[in-house]
Amino acid sequence: MSAPISNAERGLLELSGAPGCWIWAFTCPTPECACRTAIVLSTTGDRESLLTRGRPVAEAWLGAGGHAEVAYGLKDVIAFAVDLDTRELYSPIGDGPFDVDANPEMKAIAERLDDDVLDAIARVWHLGKGEQPPEPGERGAKIEVEGWRAGDLVVWDDARPSLRGDTYVFGERIFEAIELYCVEPDCDCGDVIVDFSAVVPRGAPHPGHVEFNGEAATLSPEQERHRERLAELWTAYCARHPRYQERFARRSETMHGLAGRIVAAPPKPKVGPNKLCPCGSGKKVKKCCGAA
């Protein structure tokens, strides 16, 4: 097999569990495109069967383009698109969500796309953009966290590079789950906060957060009228992370291991209101993030 096709094989992944199953993920090959979608193929048989049946998609992905259309037209292959951050499934072409319940074979594959698999696809996404996937810093290196003070909980993504977001879509509104952990070296509190931030539309109300004390979760809405939305978000989070207590315990152990490495980041220089906003919008600060 030629070297280019071999490069495409980075997206070949064996799913854990039974029955044995392979998928072939193709992320967006356009360097300047920020989309977080991957086309996923699966079929009956072993790795070689998938390589043979999926080869036309690999050739299109490496060539003139149109790999999504090729995937859509394949026979004897399950093909769908998945958003790496929201985990929503779509048709390989178009942007309409799939009714996975109407396709039991596809649903069985989708249910096996756990965090490890999606992280592996996200690494392929970075490599496809010509980037190195984010990985933890050198052992012992300081981790600078903006505004951090001793005793504060620390956002997981501030301490450990993240390959994907944890994003939830409710109609036209999009929220992101942000996990904060205790990093006190000798503390065994088990405290974790899952904060749900509104991403779209910009400036939407903050629904609140959920506090976990090692045994039970408590909803803390920003305002009482946001309790229903926060409950919906927490239900969606638990459905996505059914073993969230194990997740919290594992991540808490990792964060405690970083004790002594986390320090407050030096303050950033202030940007004048007529300067371009650091967020990259191209607008002046006073017309963008400094508008408030």
Image: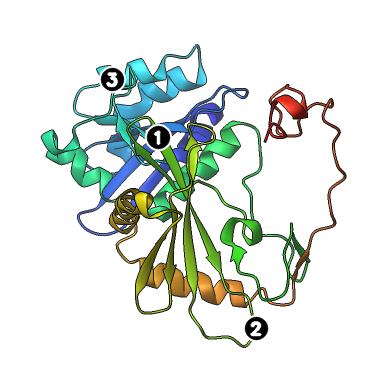
| Identity of the residue furthest to the front in this view | 224
Disc 3 residue crowd, few under 14, some 14–19, many 20+, Cα 10 Å: some
> For the residues marked 3 and 2, what is the alpha-carbon distance in whole angstroms?
52 Å
- Depth check: 9 or 133 in front? 133
Q: Residue tagged by mark 2?
A: 185
- Depth check: 20 or 81 in front? 81
Mark closer to the chain start, 1 or 3? 3
- Depth check: 174 or 185 in front? 174
Tell me which residue sits at (55%, 48%) in the image. Answer: 163
| Mark in front: 3 vs 2 | 2
Position of 287 with respect to 64 (left or right) is right
Residue 173 is labelled as 1
| Residue 147 image point, x, y percent | 74, 60
Tell me which residue sits at (24%, 44%) in the image. Answer: 109
User: Does dot 1 land on a helix, a strand or a loop?
Assistant: strand
Up-down: is 41 above or below 70?
Answer: below
Q: Amino acid at mark 1?
A: Arg
| Mark in front: 1 vs 3 | 1
Up-down: is 113 above or below 255?
Answer: above
Mark closer to the chain start, 1 or 2? 1
Q: Amino acid at mark 3?
A: Tyr
Disc 2 residue crowd, few under 14, some 14–19, many 20+, Cα 10 Å: few
Mark closer to the chain start, 3 or 2? 3
- Give the colour scheme shown: rainbow
| Residue 151 image point, x, y percent | 67, 76
Q: Residue tagged by mark 3?
A: 72
User: Does dot 3 land on a helix, a strand or a loop?
Assistant: helix
